[in-house]
Image (cartoon, helix red, strand yellow):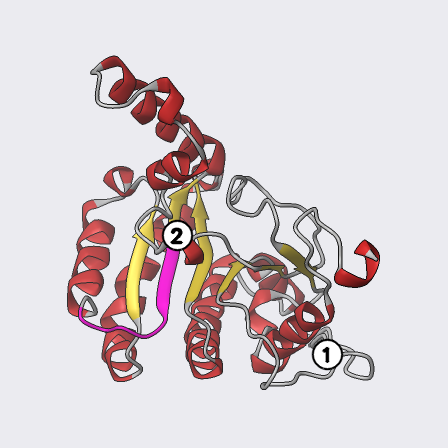
Amino acid sequence: MVLRFFPQKEKYTPEKSQLTFDPKQAIPKHIAIIMDGNGRWAKNRRLPRVAGHKEGMETVKKITKHANRLGVKVLTLYAFSTENWKRPDDEVNFLMQLPVDFFDTFVPELIEENVQVHVMGYEQYLPAHTQDAVKRAIEQTATNDGLVLNFALNYGSRAEILTAVKGIATEVQNNHLAVEEIDETVMGNHLMTGFLPEDLRDPELVIRTSGEERISNFLLWQLAYSELFFTKALWPDFDGEHLETAIADFQKRNRRFGGLDKEEKK
């Protein structure tokens, strides 16, 4: 029998020469992450895809703690989209079990870290055991007032916007809201980030791992003025150094929100 050894691809290390993280400069209050690359991470190691998802959950733990200690107020993680049901049944079943295993082991640490768990998405369509795990985690961390760990679970932004529009239309139809009263604040209140204070609803920084440069139906309304950062790092390899590199890049950005700098106005 001939044994063959397949070299693992090297972990992607961010270029630090031009991006120096400064903890004294602005830290994004709300960071959203499209966690991509679990399957490729596993494939590179000749492992089943589910091994990548399991390792990805370990990354969630590390990044949550690191973001909390940096002073981030909200960390929104794209965990499972409304389109992910199209994946093979075995993979979907594993992904539905992950929150159960994750919260059962990690909630004590979240309580110690003063992290509050929230989930946005169409939870009612999740399996009962997944719903129960989510509910327990939310209840057990409800009194924490540190970082909000917000999982987008069975979430899709187009569906979210349609649901919000239908809710607003129903209020108008029932004479609870006048058409003239509909503005961005009303829309924001009906979106799934409406539970957050108004100044924290829109992520200042959106990170996507794995080298893909797509939004993938994520927070389409909320990221209108978000800074986007794409990294080649696969999600299971993403660590505190990668997070600080993304924030360092954010700190270099000139955020004008459609206006002009003071110098440009002169």
Give the Cα distance between marks 2 and 1: 35 Å
Quarter of the figure that contains the N terminus: bottom right
Residue type beneath disc 1: Thr
Q: What element carries label 1?
A: loop
Q: Does the magenta segment cover residue 147?
A: yes
- Between 4 and 43, the one nearer to me in the picture: 43
Q: What is the span of residues highlighted in magenta in the rendered image? A: 143-152
User: Dot 2, crowdedness within 10 Å: few (<14), some or many (≥20)?
Assistant: few
Q: Is residue 243 above or below residue 202?
A: below
Q: Dot 2: what SS? A: helix
The quarter holding residue 185 reads: top left
- Tell whether position 70 is magenta: no
Q: Quadrant of residue 137?
A: bottom left
Mark 1 Cα shell of 10 Å, populated few (<14), some (14-19), many (≥20): some
Residue 181 pos. (x, y %)? 36, 26
Instruction: Identify the residue position indicated by label 1 in the image.
Output: 13
Pick whichever, 76 or 35, lies toward us.
76
| Residue labelled with disc 2 | 198
Residue 113 lies, in percent from the top left, at 31, 82
Which residue is painted at 76% across and 79% down in the image?
Answer: 19
Whether residue 217 is situated above or below residue 32 in the rendered picture? above
Please give the label number shown on residue 126: none
Image position of 7 (left or right of 118): right
Q: Residue at x 75, y 59 (%)?
A: 261
Furthest-front residue in this view? 266
Between marks 2 and 1 in the image, the one whose residue lies nearer the viewer = 2
Is 119 situated above or below 69? Answer: above
Residue 207 x %, y %: 61, 61
- Image coords of residue 130 (percent x, y): 25, 52
* Residue appearing at x 56%, y 65% in the figure: 47
